[in-house]
Amino acid sequence: MIKFVEHLLETIIFRSRWLLAPMYIGLVAGLGILLVKFVQEFIHIASHVLEAQEQEVVLSLLALVDITLVANLLIMVIFSGYENFVSKIDVADSEDRPDWMGKVDYSGLKLKLIGSIVAISAIDLLKAFVHQSTGLVHLANEQMAWMVGIHITFIVTGLLFAIMDHIAEKDKHH
């Protein structure tokens, strides 16, 4: 009887990973939302390109890059998270299958995510500096300091993750 209960409990726990699947579907829907915002911003840029100042165009293009980086981040989370925690994605014979798919473990995903977050933060910081230098928007020095501080925090976090993974890998091989 105890073995049966133990097996039942382990089966329920193992199959509970499928509760993540709707969350990944939600992230796929989030990609659709990002696509709508990307198209909306692109149409806005294209329709005003002739009368817009160069800095405004650059800022709008940085917004497109920002949206694209967030979409890339979502793809990494969807693919890697699903494959690491739910089930393998069976498209091995597809020529479009990304090389990293199926090879990124949780540690690699963590580093890719923090790298993407640092890139997104850098783009936002660049936009803030461009806004500041053109006079389009005036941010208080305190706001700029917070943005720089948060960006540095992301960088330090990424470096610490990389160092921890390097130490863990070194310990694994000894």
Image (cartoon, rainbow, N blue to C red):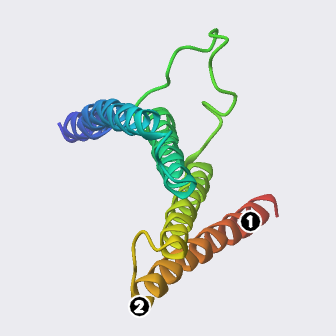
Calculate the distance from the C-alpha at mark 1 to the C-alpha at mark 2: 36 Å
In the visual, does 163 lie left or right of 57?
Answer: right
Amino acid tagged 1:
His
Q: Are marks 1 and 2 in contact (CB under 8 Å)?
A: no
Q: Which labelled disc corresponds to residue 35?
A: none
| Closest to the observer, 104 or 158 | 158
Q: Quadrant of the C terminus?
A: bottom right
Question: Please, is residue 46 above or below residue 126 in the view?
Answer: above
Question: Please, is residue 163 above or below residue 78 in the view?
Answer: below
Q: Nearer the viewer, mark 1 or mark 2?
A: 2
Question: Please, is residue 13 above or below residue 108 in the view?
Answer: above
Q: Quadrant of the N terminus?
A: top left
Question: Please, is residue 31 above or below residue 89 in the view?
Answer: below
Q: Label 1: how many residues lie within 10 Å, few (<14), some (14-19) or many (20+)?
A: few
* Residue 14 drawn at (x, y percent): 33, 36
Residue at 29% x, 39% y: name it: 10
* Residue 139 drawn at (x, y percent): 40, 80
Q: Which labelled disc corresponds to residue 166?
A: 1
Identify the mark nearer the N-term, 1 or 2: 2
User: What residue sits right under mark 2 in the picture?
Assistant: 142
In the visual, does 88 lie left or right of 86?
Answer: right
Q: Label 2: how many residues lie within 10 Å, few (<14), some (14-19) or many (20+)?
A: few
**Which residue sits furthest bottom?**
142
| Mark 2 residue element | helix
Residue at 55% x, 75% y: name it: 133
In the visual, does 35 lie left or right of 111?
Answer: left
Residue at 57% x, 53% y: name it: 54
| Mark 1 residue element | helix
Amino acid tagged 2:
Glu
Residue at 58% x, 79% y: name it: 152
**Which residue sits furthest front?**
51
